[in-house]
Image (cartoon, coloured by chain):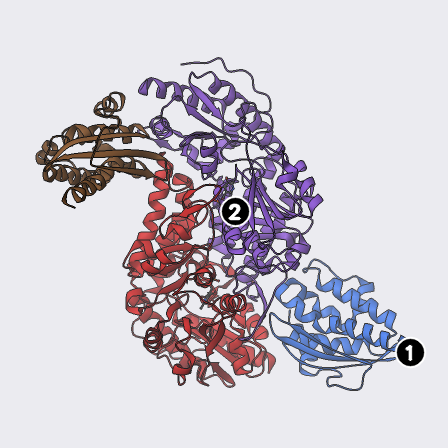
Chain colours: A brown, B red, C purple, D blue
């Protein structure tokens, strides 16, 4: 479960800290107390920045760092595809071996495949990704409103 | 005494089935083989269920949910897996509609209490009416009496015909615009009557009342499809369907389970707790306070697997044949009077009767000396005894392992009882 | 890593004890021997209990009470015999004061609901106060929050000291003339604290308040004497004391059980039922609606026999020694901070801690990979986490089969965790 | 359990029917519906008559008949001794073998020893005896009042 990639992200998180954003959300995993505050800044259709702060286990922390690395700079449609692929992987209960296309899409996030075998930890891995989806939705509404 | 036994269509291979039930080998009173005809009280347990329980405790036991260690994950997977099995068994639209309780009685009390504490439109109060029937088990009477007393609601009920069926002739006066909930049994544990769900549900829906079905005597014996029933709640109990004691089920429609308030408070049923206030987990956990009956759920899952492998339709056909044969044999006994439908149509596998003026206690005791286990008394349905002016009945009830030879033993035993007290 | 282990006085012969528990032989994660330190969540089950369950289902299974056949009489004798055993185990003045529930949570909800529906002098309403503590398990918080919401009563509580003990300094302001019930835990499942019963009971008696003690974490580990406690109600749960899941106990003083109203309605709890009204059986049956957890009571009886044969004082001494050793070894780990009393005095065998800023989930997961099962989270006592400003703790908890070698494995495992995330 | 003595009393009950009395009681065994209405007539310290009517199983019927046979004509103290001996026997769970003294006291009622092994039936056997005790107490109060 604790792949080196995960530990690296945990010890050296990417893009941690709160910066300007178009929308901010606060998500909590009530059963274990993991929390994240996450902001998304959009630049047209591009994810210009994802900044975050929170407390939680290595899985939730590393997952937020990987998210930042993967999604920042992508256009929203592409980022959403990555988000969906990650969701699919995490809900696979360890039954899914990522194919080439998925590996390409998910990059470092593939390292979380092992986590999907641990139902109690899947929520930790998904925390930031659900927060990102929520925040991005809000940010787009802001912009179009 | 021998009796030329007719060929009965639809029987299971009981020789094979009986091998699964260790207790059926038991001899009592100096070598008499047990003839167990008390299945409406509780069923016996197959080896598969007993082993599932032992296996759980020997290898996987842990408390469920939130654990990150292997045993906790295994126990959680087994417990939630049992929920999946039960959901499939009753054709529930969602696994989250299956609540594990301690028995059917708790399931029914849960419904009554949810409604007692609910907000509108569900709230039961002094302007509303509750409808049950005269053939209910005490567990589907007393919770509603308590609710009526505590809220001021009016308790009404359907009476019974002389044939032991629901008297629905005044259905429009019994179920009215004031009715908030109609709760009735699918199959009576004392009369054996199988009730006409559709007519009642249709009228309840007309007036916007919720429908709660007590399926305790149905789930063990036939295909139960909560969607086909069109009820809002369905309650049943594990120990009557080859499962362990200590577990019951309440199925409820998802929207209702979301809207209605919790009943028991405690660990597992919460989302977040502070000293000042708490929020509750989504159903089914909202209604499962404290450490659940983990091993018992696993055992019930094994029971459901066992029953499904044989097939609920096959079990129903078997019991239909046995019950028909029993009705035929018993009706030939002088002085025997059935309490409940005399024909096998729309009836379950429990047969109540009076034998002349021999008291049921004596009937049961003398049968017991022959190794035959029947139940005597009011069967937790005293209003039925009052209705038919009898202190008690003798009840024989069958299950998938019951044989025509056991019916013969019963009939012969009853002849012996008659002579003994004659 | 080796550590010179001191000689620990009072240890049980764990080599012999462990042979009774099949699961302790289990290997996980490719051949790692299970080190089970999650006993505060649930205990493992000895062969004697597992066999009692199987034996019940294989030979004696029937529904209890009122049966005249052999199996029904045997099942009733076994079920009621289990009540005798539990009554003796807690030194109850009368067997009729022992109510079987489904778990401790139901026991506590039962008390809360009896008081909610009671008449004076017990009635809880908007003029009255309920007192609990900040270290309660959610199962001793939420029922009282619900009661307070539904009756308008005020919920008050004792706070905690920085050392993880009850702050009783303002006891006379917390428990007042308005207090109707004080409910608190004898031993905390998260902090390990053993609370001073006498001081609280004395004050409660002064103001005429009832006292309910949550003994879920005490009954498994020490001699429990309900008379010595001088409480009015004592709740505990079977699965934490070598018994099966699906059974709990509420002991209550006879006069109270007679005076207070029933909670769940249904079969078994009635004296006589008509459609218009019902009367209730005397306690304990009044509070046991529906088919009781028969097999589970038999299993709990076997558990009580098992524990008594070893001796509760011997078990307490063993755990005292193990806990003391664990506190000593863990305190030597850099960055480890205890959440709860740091000394072995007045404390149970559950030890919560934080390890630097490594999240408990990670601690638990890495320990699990070593075969060590601990629990991580808020342990159904979230107010304690809020009080100490932590999201969760890691908790190791011991029982009669825990060994010094397992403590060493834990300590070594925690060093490994530190290095892993270091 | 069904000794011939018991069956005899069941088929040919002694003193059944309600006659004049100083006190009447109605006792019910709620779990099985057995009922008895019983009257006691005292003549000084003597049990002059015990008359009864009821419905129930052979055990409760036979036991009332035996009671009538045994107690009528005895003085109250002696009758109470018989009642207590019968109670003791019935609560013995089949563990008690009546000694000579008890046999002499209980006469036909000794036949109920076997019933004491059946917890569900003990109440049936005791129904009339408890009713008698109750009625006798009331009758004496009447007289002394
Ligand atoms: C102190 C305490 N009280 C109550 C409970 C609730 O017990 P159960 O979950 O068996 O209802 C527990 C255990 O979880 C506990 O530790
Ligand atoms: C029709 C019916 N409803 C409810 C119940 C109550 O089930 P339980 O005793 O398991 O709660 C029974 C069985 O006793 C029953 O036959």
Q: In this view, does C19 lie above or below C10?
A: below
In this picture, residue D141 sits left or right of residue B6: right
Queried on whether the Cβ of the residue with tag 1 lies below 8 angstroms from ligand 2, the answer reads no
Q: In this view, does A69 lie above or below A45?
A: above
Residue A129 higher or lower than D104, as above or below:
above
Residue C123: quarter of image: bottom right
Q: Do labels 1 and 2 share a chain?
A: no
Give the x, y percent position of residue A127.
27, 37
* Left or right of A101 in this view: D131: right
Q: Which residue is drawn at 61% across and 59% down?
A: C118
Q: Position of residue C309 (x, y in %)?
A: 60, 37
Height in image: D121 above or below B6?
A: above
Judging from the image, mark 2 belongs to the subunit labelled C
Tag 1 residue: D44
Residue designated by label 2: C104
Q: What element carries label 1?
A: loop
User: Which of these two is toward me, C336 or D48?
Assistant: C336
**Helix, strand or loop for disc 2:** helix
């Amino acid at each position: 479960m604790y792949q080196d990639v995960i530990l690296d992200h945990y010890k050296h998180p990417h893009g941690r800290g709160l910066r300007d954003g178009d929308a901010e959300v606060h998500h909590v995993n009530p059963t274990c107390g993991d929390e994240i505050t996450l902001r998304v800044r959009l630049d047209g259709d591009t994810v210009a920045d994802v900044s975050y702060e929170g407390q939680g286990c290595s899985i939730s922390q590393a997952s937020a760092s990987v998210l930042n690395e993967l999604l920042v700079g992508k256009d929203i449609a592409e980022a959403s595809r990555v988000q969906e692929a990650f969701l699919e992987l995490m809900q696979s209960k360890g039954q899914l071996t990522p194919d080439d296309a998925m590996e390409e899409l998910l990059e470092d996030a593939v390292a979380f495949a092992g986590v999907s075998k641990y139902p109690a930890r899947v929520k930790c891995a998904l925390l930031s990704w659900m927060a990102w989806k929520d925040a991005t939705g809000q940010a787009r509404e802001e912009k179009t409103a | 005494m021998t009796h030329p036994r007719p060929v009965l269509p639809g029987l299971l291979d009981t020789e094979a089935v009986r091998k699964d039930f260790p207790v059926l080998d038991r001899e009592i009173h100096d070598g008499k083989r047990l003839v167990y005809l008390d299945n409406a009280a509780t069923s016996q347990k197959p080896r598969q269920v007993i082993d599932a329980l032992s296996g759980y405790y020997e290898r996987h036991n842990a408390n469920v949910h939130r654990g990150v260690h292997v045993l906790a994950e295994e126990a959680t997977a087994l417990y939630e897996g049992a929920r999946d099995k039960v959901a499939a068994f009753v054709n529930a639209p969602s696994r989250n509609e299956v609540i594990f309780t301690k028995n059917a009685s708790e399931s029914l009390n849960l419904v009554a209490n949810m409604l007692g504490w609910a907000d509108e439109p569900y709230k039961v109060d002094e302007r509303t009416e509750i409808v049950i029937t005269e053939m209910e088990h005490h567990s589907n009477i007393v919770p509603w009496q308590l609710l009526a007393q505590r809220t001021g609601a009016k308790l009404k009920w359907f009476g019974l015909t002389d044939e032991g069926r629901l008297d629905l002739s005044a259905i429009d006066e019994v179920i009215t615009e004031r009715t908030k909930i109609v709760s009735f049994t699918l199959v009576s544990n004392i009369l054996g009557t199988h009730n006409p769900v559709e007519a009642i549900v249709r009228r309840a829906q007309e007036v916007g009342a919720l429908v709660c079905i007590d399926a305790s005597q149905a789930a063990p014996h036939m295909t139960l499809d909560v969607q086909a029933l069109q009820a809002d709640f369905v309650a049943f109990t594990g120990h009557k369907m080859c499962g362990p004691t200590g577990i019951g089920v309440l199925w409820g429609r998802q929207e209702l389970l979301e809207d209605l308030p919790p009943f028991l408070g405690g660990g597992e049923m919460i989302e977040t707790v502070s000293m000042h206030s708490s929020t509750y987990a989504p159903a089914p956990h909202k209604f499962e306070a404290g450490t659940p009956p983990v091993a018992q759920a696993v055992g019930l899952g094994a029971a459901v697997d066992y029953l499904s492998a044989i097939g609920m339709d096959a079990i129903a056909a078997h019991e239909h044949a046995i019950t028909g044969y029993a009705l035929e044999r018993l009706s030939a006994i002088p002085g025997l009077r059935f309490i409940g439908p005399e024909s096998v149509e729309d009836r379950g596998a429990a047969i109540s009767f009076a034998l002349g003026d021999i008291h049921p206690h004596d009937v049961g005791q003398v049968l017991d000396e022959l190794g035959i286990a029947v139940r005597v008394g009011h069967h937790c349905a005293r209003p039925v005894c009052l209705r038919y002016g009898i202190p008690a009945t003798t009840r024989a009830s069958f299950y998938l392992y019951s044989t025509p030879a056991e019916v013969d033993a019963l009939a012969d035993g009853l002849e012996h009882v008659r002579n003994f007290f004659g």
